[in-house]
Image (cartoon, rainbow, N blue to C red):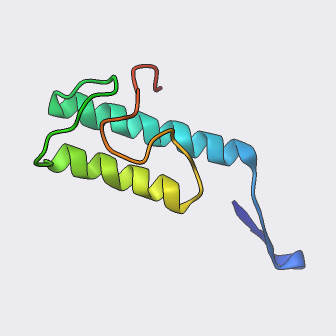
Amino acid sequence: MKYHAPTKSFVVNGDSYEMAALNMKCAIRHIRTLAGLPLEPHKGKVVMGDAEFAEAAIIGIANALGIDLGTQRHGHLDVRDAP
């Protein structure tokens, strides 16, 4: 997203949102790898640890920006093919 001063408006580029979504999925993949969690969708632990909280925060950021990663809960996203 860029601010265009002459028109005092924001210009949103679809490619930017796609890149943001890919980077979020990549971050989730790395978080799960470091925590020893599966990359495929799985049932989350009852007591969340740091990795689950980090993944939930990334999903929350995506939702706040209007990006649907395909889930609303940690552990439910398939990130096996994430970059």
Q: Position of residue 82 (x, y in %)?
A: 46, 26
Looking at the picture, tell me which residue is in the foreground, 55 or 12.
55
Q: Position of residue 52 (x, y in %)?
A: 23, 45
| Residue at horizontal 49 percent and vertical 40 percent from the top | 23
- In screen coordinates, is 65 left or right of 29? right
Looking at the picture, tell me which residue is in the foreground, 65 or 8.
65
Q: Quadrant of residue 29?
A: top left
Q: Dividing the image into 4 quarters, which one contains the N terminus? A: bottom right
Residue 75 sits above or below residue 8 on the image: above
Q: How many marks?
A: 0
Looking at the picture, tell me which residue is in the foreground, 64 or 14.
64
Outermost residue toward the right in this view: 6
Q: Position of residue 21 (x, y in %)?
A: 54, 42
Q: Position of residue 83 (x, y in %)?
A: 47, 26
| Residue at horizontal 51 percent and vertical 41 percent from the top | 69
| Residue at horizontal 63 percent and vertical 40 percent from the top | 18
Residue 6 sits above or below residue 56 on the image: below
Q: Quadrant of residue 61?
A: bottom left
- In screen coordinates, is 71 left or right of 7? left
Residue 70 sits above or below residue 54 on the image: above
Looking at the picture, tell me which residue is in the foreground, 13 or 51.
51
| Residue at horizontal 24 percent and vertical 24 percent from the top | 38
